[in-house]
Image: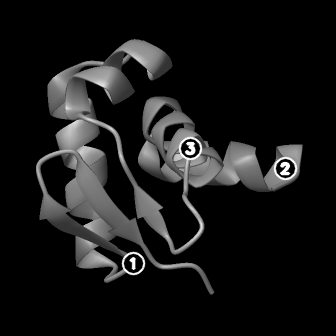
Amino acid sequence: MNDIEKGIFSAIHGEKKIQIIDFLIQNIGEHGFINLKIDEICKATNTSKPTVLQTFKLLENAKVFKKIKNGVYELKTF
């Protein structure tokens, strides 16, 4: 994502949420799974738990993210 796109998405959704999404993308495993606990995501992105959960909900509503179990999530890769 270039700086212009990042700026637009940050204005719409908030800079922290975009930072969390970027972090999730960087940590996708081979089959689209992310093996991180919420507190690990909070620490790595310097964000609060409510912000991480709001970001998860945003991605779930867009049907690109699914919780498999605690610490295991699936992010759809196109």
Judge by depth and name the residue closer to the eye, 71 or 48: 71
Three-letter residue code for mark 1:
Val
The residues bearing labels 3 and 1 have C-alpha atoms spaced at a distance of 21 Å
Q: Which residue is mark 1?
A: 64
Q: Residue at x 47, y 21 (%)?
A: 45
- Whichever of callouts 3 and 1 sits on the residue coming sooner in the sequence is 3
x and y percentages locating residue 78 in the rendered image: 63, 87
- Whichever of callouts 2 and 3 sits on the residue coming sooner in the sequence is 2
Disc 2, SS: helix
x and y percentages locating residue 30 in the rendered image: 60, 67
- Whichever of callouts 2 and 1 sits on the residue coming sooner in the sequence is 2
The residues bearing labels 2 and 1 have C-alpha atoms spaced at a distance of 23 Å
Do labels 3 and 1 touch, CB within 8 Å? no
Determine which quarter of the picture holds residue 67.
bottom left
Q: Residues within 10 Å of mark 2 (few under 14, many from 20)?
A: few
Do labels 2 and 1 touch, CB within 8 Å? no
Q: Residue at x 55, y 59 (%)?
A: 29
Q: Which mark is residue 11?
A: 3
Do labels 2 and 3 touch, CB within 8 Å? no
Q: Quadrant of the N terminus?
A: bottom right
Three-letter residue code for mark 3:
Ala
Tell me if 56 is positioned left or right of 5 in this view: left
Q: Residues within 10 Å of mark 1 (few under 14, many from 20)?
A: some
| In the depicted structure, whether residue 38 falls above or below residue 18 | above
Judge by depth and name the residue closer to the eye, 64 or 10: 64
Three-letter residue code for mark 2:
Ile
Determine which quarter of the picture holds residue 47.
top left
Tell me if 23 is positioned left or right of 13 in this view: right
Q: Which mark is residue 4?
A: 2
